Amino acid sequence: MATLTILRYPDPRLHKIARPVAVVDARIRQLVDDMLETMREADGVGLAATQVDVHEQVIVIDTSQQRDQPLVLINPELVWRSDERVIHEEGCLSVPAIFEKVQRHAEVTVAALDREGQRFERRVEGLTAVCVQHEMDHLLGKVFVEYLSPLKRERIRIKMNKRTREELQERQQA
Ligand code: GNR
Ligand code: NI
C-alpha cells in the first residue's frame, strides 16, 4: 500500500471530470486500497480519486466511529434523493482548515460497484449522505467551495495560495 498526494484547491486538476471505470481489476483494487490508506492517514471521512489526480469514478468513505467500515463506490449513481435537505458544515482534504455550511439532500440511495465489481444499492443518511454527495461532486470536478458566494470563494483562494507560499518558504529554509 502507499499513500497518495492530495491535490489542493485551487488546482485546476480538481475540475477534471472522472470517466467511468471499465473493469474493476487489480489496478482499481490497488487504487482503492491506496485511497483508503490516504484517507485514514489524513483523518478524512471520504476521498474521491480526483483528489489524488486519478480521473476515474472511484470513491472511498468511512464515517464509522472505529473507522473500520469502508464504503467503496465505483461508478456511483444516485438513484433516489430525499426532498428533505440538511445544512451541514463541510470540510475537504483538498481545502484544509476551511469549514463552511452547504445544503444537501438529507438521504440518498446510491447504486455503485464494490471492490469486487459487484453492483449494489445503499440508502444512506446523516454524515454518510453528505459525504456521498460531496465525493460525487469531486468526480464531476466540483469542490464544495463552489456552492459559496464568490466573495467567500475568493477569500478562500487567497488563503490557500498564501498558505502554499508559506509552506514553500518553510521548506526552503529547512
Ligand atoms: O474528511 C472530510 N470531512 C467532511 C466533513 C463534512 C462534509 C464532507 C466531508 S468530506 C472530507 C474529506 C474529503 O475532502 N472528501 O472529498
Ligand atoms: Ni473533498
Image: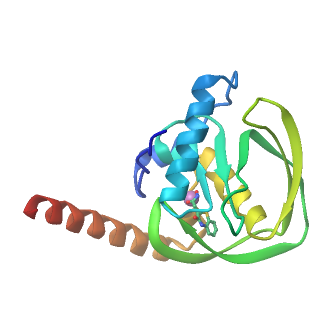
Q: Check the image and report above or below for 5 versus 74.
A: below
Identify which residue, 53 or 33, lies in the foreground. 33
Q: Check the image and report above or below for 168 versus 141.
A: below
Whether residue 86 sits left or right of residue 54 in the image: it is right
Q: Position of residue 130 (x, y in %)?
A: 73, 65
Quarter residue 46 falls in: bottom right
| Quarter the C terminus occupies | bottom left
Whether residue 8 sits left or right of residue 100 in the image: it is left
Q: Residue at x 83, y 73 (%)?
A: 85
Q: Check the image and report above or below for 100 versus 62.
A: below
Ligand 2's image quarter is bottom right
Residue 15 seen in render: yes
Quarter residue 172 falls in: bottom left
Q: Position of residue 19 (x, y in %)?
A: 63, 31
Q: How many labels sit on residues? A: 0
Q: Residue at x 91, y 67 (%)?
A: 83
Residue 17 seen in render: no
Q: Position of residue 1 (x, y in %)?
A: 49, 38
Q: Residue at x 76, y 42 (%)?
A: 76
Q: Residue at x 70, y 52 (%)?
A: 70
Q: How is the image coloured?
A: rainbow
